[in-house]
Image (cartoon, rainbow, N blue to C red):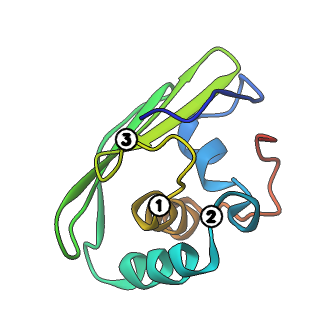
Amino acid sequence: MTEPATPCDEREPVAVLFGALPLDELAIPSSIRLGERIASHHDGVVVTKQDEFALVAKVTVGQARTVTVSRDGRDLSWRCSCTRRTDLFCKHLTATVFHLRHQIGVGSSSRACVP
């Protein structure tokens, strides 16, 4: 359920780190395409909790899913309620990344965690 932790800059908020992830290295093209479509909907992704160490988002397009991202020191981890597979960076996780990039102006060229 949880992706193996990824070392990060511990000074950055979890939303910035997650938003800067290199999607082309983590997700398959269809998840990127669908995630971008979901994120483009008004309220397609709603962040329900956000602080320096954790983020919870509801993906509301289609069947509602919950994305959870957390940071423990330099380790960033994530999971989605749609799957138990740890190797799948799904469309819901991808939609959350696109939402954060739009919301806080983070781009994939920002300093990201290296998987």
Callouts 2 and 1 close, C-beta under 8 Å? yes
Relative to 8, residue 63 above or below: below
Under tag 3, what secondary structure?
loop
Mark 2 or mark 3, whichever is nearer to me: 3
Name the residue at 37% across, 78% down: 38
The answer to which of marks 1 and 3 sits earlier in the sequence is 3
Under tag 1, what secondary structure?
loop
Relative to 72, residue 106 above or below: below
Q: Residues within 10 Å of mark 2 (few under 14, many from 20)?
A: some
Q: Quadrant of residue 68?
A: top left
Give the labeled residue for mark 3. 84
Q: Name the disc covering residue 43, or none.
A: none
Q: Amino acid at mark 3?
A: Arg
Residue 115: image location, x then y, percent: 77, 41
Give the labeled residue for mark 1. 90
Q: Residues within 10 Å of mark 1 (few under 14, many from 20)?
A: many
Name the residue at 71% across, 22% down: 10
Residue 14: image location, x then y, percent: 56, 36
Residue 33: image location, x then y, percent: 53, 83
